[in-house]
């Protein structure tokens, strides 16, 4: 028995009474748990009647723009330019059809319709993460450390930190890596647990990070960054993954006026099935290029 994408009905289900609230709730919970990148970027809701949302990219003022003034005299006005960055809203949809016969024959306990919510919520969350992760690609940002075919090193992470500080990127600073960039033989795990000193059995870099990884399976803070891992930072050709170090203002996520995700059900009596449709409404854009550093590295 397998859930379909809407093209073919599930093969084996009575009308699911009272299941809508359960499916919606589970979908939202799954969405919140699975999505990694969306909470780390600037989010702005669109207004009804508009398909685009604009984010402002301000030029940064520096200490050099502040001058000593002479009493009772004018100072020179400094130009603060802004550039509009536009995110265009679009629909992202997944549909699952559950037939009455399938629901009737579901023997795993509970309702088959009730299980559909977490599955479609997870899929929408993964798609949102995937769209945002596509903004990380090497070549799309001015600054890129490490590089295709190069193994990740501590120097690359600190170089990304240096670049973000130099460009006045506001904290908190985030480091989002792919799964292999985090746990692979050439990833963050190796940097944290590469034993060089017998007196430090968990890490050659620092006992705290090594112990955290050993106990929890992940590192929450490293080299000034909040560290996250997303499976949607996928492996590209050449055995590389394209992670990113960034501040919240680097990327923008626009959502629809009705929210980010909506779940609807529709009864198709002639086919004896219920359609479950999850629709995500969003658009994404780069806001400030210098607030992000692409971190492409070899994971082979």
Image (cartoon, rainbow, N blue to C red):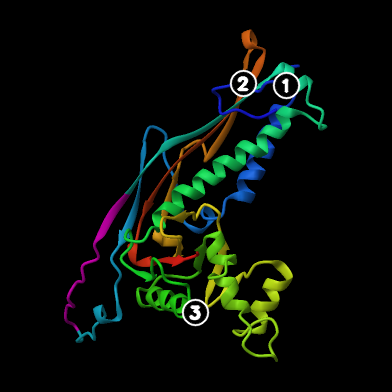
Q: Which residue is mark 2?
A: 9
The Cα atoms of the two marked residues, 1 and 3, are separated by 53 Å
- At label 2, counting other C-alpha atoms closer than 10 Å, the crowd grade (few under 14, some 14-19, many 20 or more) is some
Q: Which residues are magenta?
A: 72-85
- At label 3, counting other C-alpha atoms closer than 10 Å, the crowd grade (few under 14, some 14-19, many 20 or more) is few
Q: Are marks 1 and 3 in contact (CB under 8 Å)?
A: no
Number of numbered discs on residues? 3
Q: Residue furthest top?
A: 270
| Residue 197 image offset from top left, x and y in percent | 65, 90
56 on left or right of 134: left
Residue 102 numbered mark, or none: 1
What's the residue at 65%, 23% (across, down)? 10
What's the residue at 30%, 66% (across, down)? 142
The Cα atoms of the two marked residues, 1 and 2, are separated by 9 Å
Residue 13 lies in quadrant? top right
105 or 73, which is in the foreground? 105
Q: Are marks 2 and 3 in contact (CB under 8 Å)?
A: no
What's the residue at 17%, 76% (across, down)? 76
138 or 172, which is in the foreground? 138
Earlier along the polypeptide chain: callout 1 or callout 3?
1
Q: Which residue is mark 3?
A: 154
What's the residue at 49%, 54% (across, down)? 234
| Residue 179 image offset from top left, x and y in percent | 56, 60
User: Was residue 80 drawn as part of the magenta stretch in this picture?
Assistant: yes
């Amino acid at each position: 028995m397998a859930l379909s994408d809407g093209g073919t009905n599930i093969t084996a289900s009575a009308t699911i009474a009272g299941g809508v609230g359960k499916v919606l709730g589970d979908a939202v919970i799954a969405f919140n748990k699975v999505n990694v990148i969306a909470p780390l970027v600037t989010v702005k809701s669109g207004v009804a009647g508009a398909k685009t949302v604009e984010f402002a990219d301000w030029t940064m003022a520096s200490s050099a723009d502040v001058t000593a003034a002479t009493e009772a005299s004018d100072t020179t006005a400094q130009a603060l330019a802004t550039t509009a960055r536009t995110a265009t809203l679009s629909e992202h949809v997944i549909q699952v059809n559950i037939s009455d016969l399938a629901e009737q024959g579901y023997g795993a306990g509970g309702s088959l319709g009730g299980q559909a919510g977490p599955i479609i919520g997870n899929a929408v969350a993964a798609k949102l993460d995937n769209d945002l992760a596509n903004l990380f690609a090497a070549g799309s940002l001015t600054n890129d450390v490490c590089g295709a075919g190069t193994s990740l090193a501590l120097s690359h992470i600190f170089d990304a930190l240096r670049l973000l500080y130099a460009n006045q990127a506001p904290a908190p600073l985030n480091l989002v890596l792919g799964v292999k960039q985090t746990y692979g033989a050439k990833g963050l795990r190796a940097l944290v647990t590469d034993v060089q000193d017998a007196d430090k059995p968990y890490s050659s870099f620092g006992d705290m990070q090594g112990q955290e990884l050993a106990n929890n399976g992940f590192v929450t803070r490293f080299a000034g960054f909040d560290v996250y891992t997303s499976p949607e930072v996928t492996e590209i050709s050449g055995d590389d993954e394209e992670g990113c170090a960034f501040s919240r203002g680097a990327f923008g996520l626009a959502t629809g006026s009705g929210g980010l995700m909506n779940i609807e059900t529709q009864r198709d009596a002639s086919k004896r099935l219920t359609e479950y449709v999850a629709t995500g409404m969003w658009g994404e854009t780069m806001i400030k290029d210098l607030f992000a550093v692409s971190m492409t590295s070899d994971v082979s």
